[in-house]
């Protein structure tokens, strides 16, 4: 096979485009930042969530967190007890005191699955186990609600006396 | 009366609040700054997370020791930050320069190297006249 001028030009063009792509990918890019929270069952999987709880007995769940902010983040999960129609929005957290919380530091691209045990003291129907994601804002020196949460509706029955 | 009803909830919240977070926050500020500069702080993050677990188990002295150790390492990394930043930019510059140099080098050397390889692959070839007539 002979390398004539036309073949050489095509090969050089391919190499040039590959190198230009390589240069473009070499520069650090700001990824679209996001954090995520998810609720998993006792085995740490999606589905088969408990729907009926006994008052005073802990519900075993897992909370999944992910950091994709482009830098390390200190995240906190707050568990609260809500009800149907009384859950957080993406701008305001639930106006209730946390019954459980856990902070964790995650590097960019890291995730964590945290076991949770929550006991609801009083029986009730259509109660919501709410898990809110908060992020520590180092510039403000305070925890800021990320607008992300997940919840699980449960009925809580009275335990045997 | 309404405040009295909220009192048990408030007490529950205080009991559930995770202790030790305040101490970790100081180290986290350095972690956030260094990680945003691209410094690998995964070892320090693991230490701080372990410290948070220990604080939750009320093993305060062990957790304090871990936080102190992580802080010491983070402060050392922070002092090296100008050199790390310079090394990062130098590495990026070298990568870009190398990639930019590839096309002209390819254009100049590839036909020559190809011709050399072509000739070497055929160096034992014998040239004969076809027909062998005189």
Image (cartoon, coloured by chain):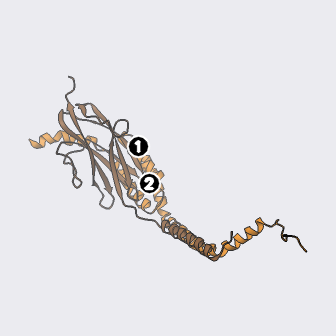
Task: Chain letter for mark 1, please.
Answer: B
- Asked if residue A98 is positioned above or below residue B41 in the image, the reply reads above
Please indicate whether residue B99 sits to the left or right of residue B71 in the image: right
How far from the left and from the top, in percent, is residue A16? 55, 72
Task: Identify the mark at residue B61; answer none if there is no mark.
Answer: 1
Q: Which chain is orange?
A: B
Secondary element at tag 1: helix
Secondary element at tag 2: helix
Q: Say which quarter of the image contains residue B59.
A: top left
**Between A88 and A137, the one nearer to me in the picture:** A88
* Position of the N terminus of chain B by quadrant: top left
Please indicate whether residue A99 sits to the left or right of residue A15 in the image: left
How far from the left and from the top, in percent, is residue A25? 48, 65
- Answer yes or no: is residue A158 visible: yes
Query: Residue at image x 32%, y 55%?
Result: A136
- Asked if residue A50 is positioned above or below residue A11 in the image, the reply reads above
- Answer yes or no: is residue B90 visible: no
* Position of the C terminus of chain B by quadrant: bottom right
**Between B107 and A150, the one nearer to me in the picture:** B107
View extreme (left): residue: B1
Q: CA distance from mark 2 to mark 1?
A: 15 Å
Contact between marks 2 and 1 (CB within 8 A): the answer is no
Task: Tell me what hue chain A is rendered in.
Answer: brown
Task: Identify the mark at residue B71; answer none if there is no mark.
Answer: 2
Q: Say which quarter of the image contains residue A130.
A: top left
Can marks 2 and 1 be said to lie on one chain?
yes
Query: Residue at image x 23%, y 35%?
Result: A120
How far from the left and from the top, in percent, is residue B40? 48, 57
Task: Chain letter for mark 2, please.
Answer: B
């Amino acid at each position: 096979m002979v390398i004539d001028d036309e073949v050489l030009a095509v090969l050089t063009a391919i190499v040039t485009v590959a190198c230009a792509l390589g240069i473009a990918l070499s520069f650090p890019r700001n990824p679209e930042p996001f954090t995520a929270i998810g609720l998993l069952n006792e085995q740490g999987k999606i589905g088969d969530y408990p729907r009926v709880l006994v008052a005073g007995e802990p519900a075993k769940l897992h909370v999944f967190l992910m950091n994709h902010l482009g830098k390390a983040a200190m995240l906190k999960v707050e568990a609260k007890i809500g009800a149907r129609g009384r859950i957080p929005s993406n701008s305001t957290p639930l106006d209730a005191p946390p019954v459980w919380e856990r902070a964790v530091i995650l590097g960019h691209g890291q995730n964590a699955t945290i076991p949770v045990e929550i006991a609801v003291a009083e029986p009730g129907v259509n109660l919501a186990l709410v898990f809110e994601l908060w992020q520590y804002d180092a510039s403000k020196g305070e925890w800021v609600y990320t607008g992300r949460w997940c919840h699980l509706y449960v009925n809580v029955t009275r335990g045997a006396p | 009366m309404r405040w009295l009803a909220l009192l048990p909830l408030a007490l529950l919240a205080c009991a559930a609040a995770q202790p030790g977070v305040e101490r970790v926050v100081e180290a986290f500020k350095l972690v956030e700054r260094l990680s945003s500069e691209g410094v690998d702080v995964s070892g320090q993050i693991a230490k701080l997370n372990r410290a948070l677990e220990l604080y939750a188990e009320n093993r305060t002295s062990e957790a304090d020791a871990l936080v102190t150790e992580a802080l010491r390492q983070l402060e050392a990394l922070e002092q090296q930050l100008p050199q790390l930043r310079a090394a990062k930019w130098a590495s990026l510059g070298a990568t870009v320069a190398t990639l930019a140099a590839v096309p002209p080098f390819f254009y100049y050397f590839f036909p020559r190297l190809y011709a050399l390889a072509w000739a070497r692959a055929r160096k034992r070839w014998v040239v004969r006249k076809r027909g062998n007539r005189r």
